[in-house]
Every structure is written in C-alpha cells, then in structure tokens.
Image (cartoon, grey):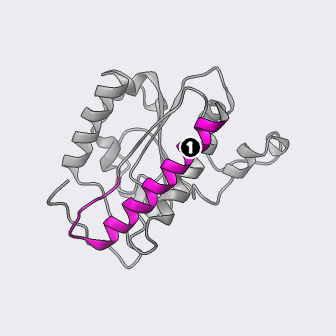
Amino acid sequence: MPNLNYEPTSDLGEFYTPVRVSKSLRTLTASVLGDNFENEYVIWDCCCGHFALTHELNILDDSNLYCSTLRAEDIDGFQEEKGIKFQYDFLNDDVEKLLDTSEFMFGEYKMPSGLLDTLNNPNGKPILFYINPPYGSKNKGLSTIAWLHRCMELCKQESSGCLVIPYDENVLWTVEAMRNIQDFLIKLLEVMKEEF
C-alpha cells in the first residue's frame, strides 16, 4: 500500500494502523469470510495498540471481540472502543497453559474467561485473529513470525487469520521483513501439505 508512514512511533519500532488500512482490511476480510464475519467469529486483536484496526468492524455483540495490548496505558486512552479490552503479553503470558493441556485446569489466567472458554471449546465459534502485529522493523520480521506462530498454535480447525504486513519496495526493512515472513509461511505450507 503506497503512501503509508513507515516511520516508527517510538524507538521500539511501533506503528499504528491508519484508518484507511482498517477500512480496506474490513472490506477485504468480508470478501473472503462473508459480510457478517464479525458476528460469526470470535475476533481477537491480540496487539490492538490504539484500536484502529477493530474500530471499523460491525460488531453487534461486544462479547465476540477481544482486544489485548502489551501496555495498559493503551487501553486507558480508548475505553470507548468496542470489545472486551485487557492488558496481555501475547507471546509471554499464560498462553502456554493453553498449549500444554496438563496445565489447563490449574492456576489463574490473565485473559478473560470468555476468551479462554472459546479457545478451549473445539465445537464453539471459530476464532479470527485480526491483527496488525509488531512488524519487526528492528529484527527483519522475526517478531511478526513469532506472532504468527503463536496464533497458529491457538487456532482451532475452523479458525482464520487476517494479517496486515507493511511492504514498500523503497523501504528496505519492509522488503526484508516481507521476504522473511513469506519464507516462513511457504515453509509452513510445505510442512502442512506433507502432513495431509
């Protein structure tokens, strides 16, 4: 997408989704999953930042939308936005308990109980990871690859994903990040193809 500002908003290499990208992504997702996808999936934006990505969704039931971010101050400034909001470190918090079923019944979870129930119910609504993850402007896309890997670990059979990845042939870090992310996805598809 041309004319996006690829300058990080801090030394952390953070970027926040422009509104025009959010609108385009909603339209694109509806063309693939159907115009009512917001109400047919439980949606989790696990790196919501400033809530721009989910702002454009046509959510009828806020309990179907979960928005988590690394820093609590991101949530404090956007209380009026849709969905269930919570501070959560998607790569390091208690997601591991969901992956290791021997730990499932023990301890408290940082994520909301409704989301936990959805993740653990193979017959419930499918999950849509709807994210604009850390791009990896400082690490050639490795942070996005880590995010993708975690999302795929949590997916049920009928889950889907929609991912925003920056690319501008004139901005070297986006080219490197895109190439590494594409390589990861191609290798993953080759493994999945061999398994089936």
Q: Position of residue 102 (x, y in %)?
A: 85, 43
Q: Is residue 186 left or right of residue 23?
A: right
- Residue where numbered disc 1 is placed: 190
Give percent across and percent down for residue 56: 27, 38
> Magenta segment: does it hold 173?
yes
Q: Is residue 99 left or right of residue 7?
A: right
Which residue, as the protein is rendered here, is positioned at the far bottom? 11
Type of secondary structure dominating the magenta stretch: helix
Q: Which residues are magenta?
A: 165-194
Query: Which residue is at the front of the view, 2 or 186?
Result: 186
**Residue 51 placement (x, y as % from top left):** 35, 50
**Quadrant for the C terminus in the image:** top right
Which residue is found at the position 34% from the left and 27% from the top? 32
Asked if residue 182 lies left or right of residue 168, the reply is: right
- Residue 60 visible from this viewpoint: no
Q: Specify whether residue 73 is painted magenta.
A: no
Q: Height in image: 93 above or below 64?
A: below
* Residue 29 position (above or below residue 13): above
Tag 1's secondary structure?
A: helix
Q: Quadrant of residue 4?
A: bottom left
| Nearer to me, 37 or 55 | 37
Q: Is residue 169 above or below residue 44?
A: below
Tally the numbered discs: 1
Type of the residue with mark 1 = Glu
Look at 38% across and 27% down and name the residue there.
38
Residue 96 visible from this viewpoint: yes
At 35% from the left and 54% from the top, the residue drawn is 165
Q: Position of residue 66 (x, y in %)?
A: 48, 40
Q: In the rendered image, which quarter is residue 82 located in?
A: top left
Q: Badge 1 local density, few (<14 within 10 Å), some, or many (20+)?
A: few
Residue farthest left in this picture? 3
Residue sitting at x 45%, y 57%:
181
